[in-house]
Amino acid sequence: MPRAGLAPAAVVAAGAALADEVGFASLTMGLLAERVGVKAPSLYKHIASLEALQHGIAIQAKRELSEALARAAVGKSGPDAVRAYAGAWRRWALDHPGRYAATIRAPTADDEDEDRRVANEGLQIMYDVLAGFGLRGSRSVDAARALRSALHGFAALESASGFGLPHDVDRSFGFLLDTLIAGLQADHPTLPEDQHDHQPLTHKI
């Protein structure tokens, strides 16, 4: 019989917490079984496989990150929204390194509806943050990719202690945001596809 109180959601939550400690790539069913107090074979009564565990953690992590980003950006627009959004992204990635690693992969056509729904929610928050800059069509996609790439790159390097120079990292992060915002506010040549309305929201950019 499955251990009382050890529902799949509880196993995933324990796995997410453990991933923050040992790293998402180092998470194993054996380590998780030890954490929740069951034998490794017994853990499969609660979660089908390591892949299923990783999938569950990814969905939980994407939802938690989206909630943090939405709380930070609510009621703000333009540069203020970008700064609040970026700051929340950085803090969450540093506080939850294992979970953050689980958020990176974009959903595919084979993924479940829940995967795509959670990814769409996160992407919609990003588009809302960028809405104050008046970008349309392909420009909004370019801006979303640029923002995501910059924030992910900085967070990944910082969490891996990748900044070794004796220089204030917060100041460098501020410079990154200043540069991004200046680019978002700059005039750009109009491309033919930018004449059309915003592209339909998709679960990946």
Image (tube, helix red, strand yellow):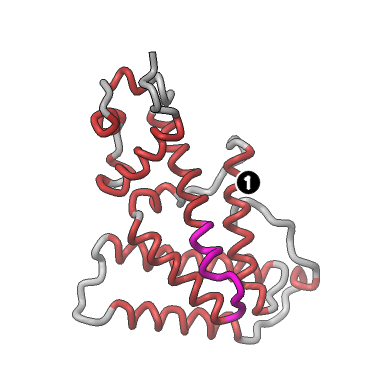
Give x and y (percent) for residue 169.
29, 77
The quarter of the displayed image where residue 160 is located? bottom left
Residue at the extreme front of the image, as rendered: 4
**Depth check: 166 or 146 in front?**
166
Q: Main secondary structure of the magenta part?
A: helix
State whether residue 160 is above or below residue 51. below
From which residue to which does the magenta span run?
66-78
- Drawn side of residue 141 relative to residue 14, left or right: right
- Drawn side of residue 120 relative to residue 92, left or right: right
Q: Give the quadrant of the C terminus.
A: bottom right
Give x and y (percent) for residue 18.
30, 42
The quarter of the displayed image where residue 75 is located? bottom right
Q: Residue at x 39, y 33 (%)?
A: 11
Residue at the extreme right of the image, as rendered: 196
Q: Residue at x 49, y 74 (%)?
A: 84
Q: According to the image, label 1 marks what residue? A: 117
State yes or no: residue 19 in magenta: no
- Drawn side of residue 200 relative to residue 84, left or right: right
10 Å crowding of disc 1: few (<14), some (14-19), many (20+): some
The quarter of the displayed image where residue 12 is located? top left
Give x and y (percent) for residue 13.
40, 40
State yes or no: residue 74 in magenta: yes
Q: Give the quadrant of the N terminus.
A: top left
Q: Residue at x 62, y 52 (%)?
A: 120
* Total numbered circles: 1
| Residue type marked 1 | Arg
State whether residue 132 is above or below residue 200. below
Residue at the extreme top of the image, as rendered: 1
State whether residue 58 is above or below residue 110. below
SS type, badge 1: helix
